[in-house]
């Protein structure tokens, strides 16, 4: 892979961390490493762990877009970046780092439910994004999802452009939509062979039509109807396409995961945070009993693909010994929390430590996913969780429950709650929360 030297790079202004753009936070700098399709080789994992130890505080986070970031970075930015580039953890062209926002299933190419292996098309899209100077104008948040119909798929994250494989008349087509999710009705479809051309046309049209203030597709579509945006595109829009709906995905992302051949293991660092020892240990297990690779998922978790089924129990025991969550019944697997006031000046509460406390209070009746957010920006998740605790002050939260009929976080069900209050309310059936 072609690498570039740090001195030649001038990162464009953005609030988002990147490889070269190390953003300051209360606990030090943040560097985000974008992984192609979430793929991280074991040797790269070792290099990343060493970089986090040498140049930062050792905190490594899995993000909700299937990437990793290092927190607590000190003054030696160049050394950190050079070590990551040497491990092949950078873009092919420096200017293309920001736009490598393409999300796949962590089991793309392996999932038995998939209609097609979308990894070849994913590689073409990433090449297009990195190799087209005009597309480097896209926001660092502008994101694309490529869905192959996998059973293990995040279908709730809105994307500026989503693409989903559909089968019509015994042929593979690519349905697509704008500023939404594959669970929504598509705007049209193209044959798979025209998928790359569709992406190129949509991105080019967005840049033609969007004002400087409209950095995301949803902002443009507030002023321009989707039908007007797609007018003139060579797409299929008959009843078979417009009536198509994406099949539901599995809710299971921890534990044993099915593959076409062999098996995979889903594991999660508590609250999305890895230590260098966790990452190195997981890489060693991937070498010993897997194919030497890891995949980072949009659930802020990891997948070890192509694991030898004969060593499943040994692998899970070893992973649990590293401090990783291996089973969906672990209370912490149901909670997502942002960095909180320890690392972010905007946060009103220490959400990470509060999440650990809340996990001990939740019973089996609580919602399947609870999100603790230190402020209204809701950085930890890209969609609205079933239950959200929005911090007001240290240790005190407002409780919202997701409601499809209401904007934002949903229905406000409790204000200025302690963690004990919130835990008790979350254990109540939904119909009793207004009592």
Image (spheres, rainbow, N blue to C red):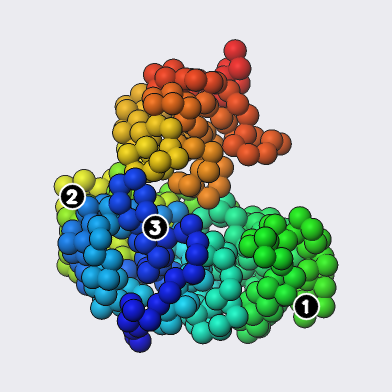
Q: Residue 78 versus residue 430: which sits nearer the camera?
A: 78
Q: Which residue is mark 3?
A: 23
Q: CA distance from mark 3 to mark 2?
A: 29 Å
* Label 2 environment density (alpha carbons within 10 Å; few <14, some 14–19, many ≥20): some
The image quadrant where one finds the C terminus is top right
Q: Residue 292's spot in the image, x, y percent? A: 25, 71
Q: Residue 406 versus residue 119: which sits nearer the camera?
A: 406
Q: Residue 348's spot in the image, x, y percent? A: 43, 32
* Label 1 environment density (alpha carbons within 10 Å; few <14, some 14–19, many ≥20): few
Lower position in the chain sequence, tag 1 or tag 2: 1
Q: Nearer the viewer, mark 3 or mark 1?
A: 3
Most distant residue in the top direction: 435
The image quadrant where one finds the N terminus is bottom left
Q: Which residue is mark 2?
A: 322
Residue in the picture at 57% in, 31% down: 401
Q: Secondary structure at mark 2?
A: loop
Residue in the picture at 50% in, 65% down: 13
């Amino acid at each position: 892979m072609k690498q570039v030297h740090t001195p030649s790079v001038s990162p464009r202004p953005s609030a988002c961390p990147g490889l070269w753009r190390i953003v300051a936070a209360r606990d030090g700098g943040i560097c985000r490493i974008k992984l192609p399709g979430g793929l991280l080789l074991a040797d790269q994992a070792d290099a990343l762990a060493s970089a986090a130890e040498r140049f930062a505080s050792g905190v490594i986070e899995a993000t909700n877009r299937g990437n990793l970031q290092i927190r607590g970075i000190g003054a030696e930015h160049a050394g950190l970046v050079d070590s990551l580039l040497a491990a092949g953890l950078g873009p092919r062209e420096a200017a293309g780092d920001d736009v490598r926002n393409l999300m796949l299933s962590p089991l793309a190419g392996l999932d038995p439910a998939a209609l097609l292996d979308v990894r070849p098309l994913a590689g073409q899209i990433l090449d297009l994004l990195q190799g087209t100077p005009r597309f480097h104008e896209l926001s660092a948040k502008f994101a694309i999802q490529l869905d192959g119909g996998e059973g293990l798929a995040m279908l709730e994250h809105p994307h500026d452009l989503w693409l989903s494989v559909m089968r019509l008349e015994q042929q593979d087509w690519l349905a697509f939509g704008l500023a939404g999710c594959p669970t929504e009705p598509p705007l049209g479809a193209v044959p798979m062979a025209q998928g790359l051309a569709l992406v190129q046309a949509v991105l080019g049209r967005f840049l033609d039509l969007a004002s400087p203030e409209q950095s995301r597709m949803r902002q443009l579509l507030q002023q321009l109807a989707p039908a007007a945006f797609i007018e003139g595109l060579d797409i299929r829009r008959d009843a078979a396409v417009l009536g198509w709906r994406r099949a539901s995905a599995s809710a299971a992302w921890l534990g044993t995961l099915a593959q076409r051949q062999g098996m995979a293991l889903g594991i999660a660092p508590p609250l999305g945070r890895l230590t260098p020892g966790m990452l190195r240990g997981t890489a060693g297990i991937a070498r010993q009993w897997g194919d030497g690779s890891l995949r980072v998922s949009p659930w802020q978790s990891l997948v070890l693909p192509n694991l030898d089924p004969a060593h499943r129990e040994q692998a899970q025991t070893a992973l649990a010994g590293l401090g990783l969550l291996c089973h969906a019944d672990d209370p912490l697997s149901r909670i997502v929390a942002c960095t909180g006031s320890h690392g972010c000046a905007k946060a009103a509460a220490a959400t990470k430590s509060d999440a650990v406390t809340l996990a001990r209070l939740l019973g089996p009746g609580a919602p399947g996913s609870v999100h603790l957010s230190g402020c209204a920006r809701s950085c930890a998740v890209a969609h609205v969780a079933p239950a959200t605790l929005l911090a007001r002050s240290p240790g005190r939260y407002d409780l919202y429950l997701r409601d499809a009929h209401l904007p934002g976080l949903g229905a406000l069900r409790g204000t200025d709650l302690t963690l004990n209050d919130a835990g008790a309310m979350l254990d109540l059936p939904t119909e009793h929360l207004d009592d």
